[in-house]
Image: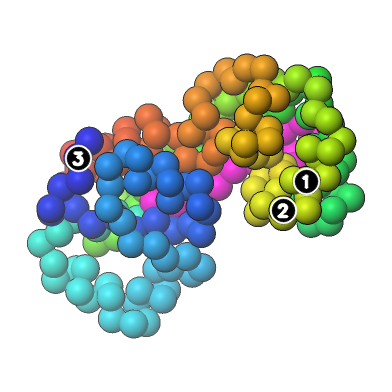
Amino acid sequence: MAASSALRLILGSSSASRRQILSEMGYKFTLLADAILEKMKNNGMMKEIVDSQETTLMITADQVVVHDGVIREKPSTPEEARKFIKGYSESHAATIGSVLVTNVKTGARKEGWDKAEVYFHKIPDEVVESLIEEGDVFYVAGGLLVEHPLTSPLVEAIVGTIDSVMGLPKALTEKLIKESLSEQ
């Protein structure tokens, strides 16, 4: 869907992957995070939105990784990251992500979830150590970086979509945006 001039999008996430995916979808957006609506009320932005003819939608999302029946969030130590990544070697993990689209003016919300699975070949120890040293694994659920140049060749298969694995499923997000716009 092409971005509409009567539509303003706010991405309530600091995730680089989510910014990339929303841009790929053709949307222009403002990035805000951390107690977003409260900040908008406090700085007068809500009055601007309420008075505007634009429809303003805020997109927020969250994700966890499930491996061997255990929910994994962002690893907090190198040891935890190492355990997570080595666990994916010759195994698989599932991502479960949620998306919430809020009409900022009306407060109406549309939400949904999506699941994907990633199957890996053997992940060599040197790849694990390089990923930990680079540090990006500490900013993603389960330390799972399927799009990274070191790990993408080691992905055997993805059941679902890579954008879902990366934290913002395009089809679900587009559906929720359209549903939000149809209720104007």
Q: CA distance from mark 3 to mark 1?
A: 38 Å
Q: Secondary structure at mark 3?
A: loop
Residue 2's label in the rendered image is 3
Specify the quadrant of the image occupied by residue 146.
top right
Count neighbours of disc 1 (C-alpha within 10 A) and say few if under 14, some if 14 to 19, many if 20 or more.
few
Position of residue 7 measured from the top left corner of the image (x, y, whole percent)? 19, 53
Q: Earlier in the sequence, mark 3 or mark 2?
A: 3
In the picture, measured across the screen, residue 13 lies left or right of residue 22, that is: right
Circle 3: residue type: Ala
Q: CA distance from mark 3 to mark 2?
A: 35 Å
Magenta residues, dominant SS class: strand
- Of residues 111 and 45, the one nearer the viewer is 45
* Residue indicated by mark 2: 134
Q: Earlier in the sequence, mark 3 or mark 1?
A: 3
Circle 1: residue type: Ser
Query: Which segment did they paint magenta?
Result: 59-74
122 versus 42 height, above or below: above
Q: Secondary structure at mark 2?
A: helix
At x 22%, y 76%, the residue is 47
